[in-house]
Amino acid sequence: MPIATLDEIRSRIGQEIGVSEWITVGQGRIDAFAEATEDHQFIHVDPEAAAKTPFGGTIAHGFLSLSLLSRMAYDVMLVPDTLKMGVNYGFDRVRFLAPVRSGSQVRGRFLLEDATDKAPGQLLTRHAVTVEIEGEDKPALTAMWLGLLFL
């Protein structure tokens, strides 16, 4: 995660702060997520049955795509040089817009919407995030992601 001062972070409000590296969403990752969440719907884990759907094959769980934001954030999310720890504070909005087919690559595009003091020593950040699918016009998802940073 790129390190910045609080003033530098605040000066980036309203700007795109970066785009993550591509992450491959292969069938092994999808199967592991199905095991972890106990969501074994056939469109995720049964290539034969999923091939007969409009998707033409297996697709990632929407929540798998969403969970990859944590990994994507490491590439681009600005953190204060005084950071003690940061926690996921939730989402104001999430929309799943297009399926992520097995074998696709995704990346996150992050725009810093806001960074405000929540309490002494706490900074609440809000990022507009778009998860793009390589070679696709429509993104996998958009989200308004909140983070709470302890300074």
Image: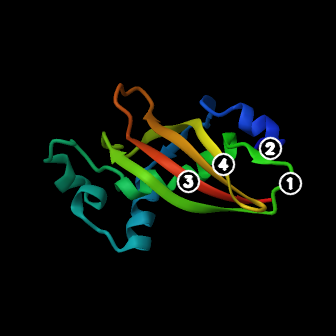
- Residue at the spot of label 3: 146
Precedes in sequence: disc 3 or disc 1: 1
Quick one: label 4, few (<14), some, or many (20+) residues within 10 Å? few
| Residue type (three-letter) at the residue carrying disc 4 | Thr
Q: Tag 4's secondary structure?
A: strand
Q: Is residue 127 left or right of residue 122?
A: left
Report how far apart the C-alphas of labels 2 and 1 lie in the structure.
8 Å
Q: Which residue is mark 1?
A: 82
Query: Would you say the residues marked 2 and 1 are in contact, meaning their CB atoms lie under 8 Å apart?
Result: yes
Disc 4 and disc 3 in contact, CB within 8 angstroms: no
Residue at coordinates 21% horizontally, 42% vertically from top-left?
56
- Which residue type carries mark 3? Leu
Could you tell me residue 78's position as x and y percent?
Answer: 72, 42
Disc 3 is placed on an element classified as strand
Dot 3: within a 10 Å radius of its alpha carbon, few (fewer than 14), some, or many (20 or more) residues? many
Whether pointer 4 and pointer 2 mark residues with C-beta atoms closer than 8 Å, the reply is no
Q: Amino acid at mark 2?
A: Leu
Question: Which circle's residue, 4 or 3, is located before the other in the chain?
Answer: 4
The numbered dot on residue 141 is none
Q: Which residue is mark 2?
A: 6
Instruction: Give me the C-alpha separation between circle 4 and circle 3.
Output: 11 Å
N-term-proximal mark, 3 vs 2: 2
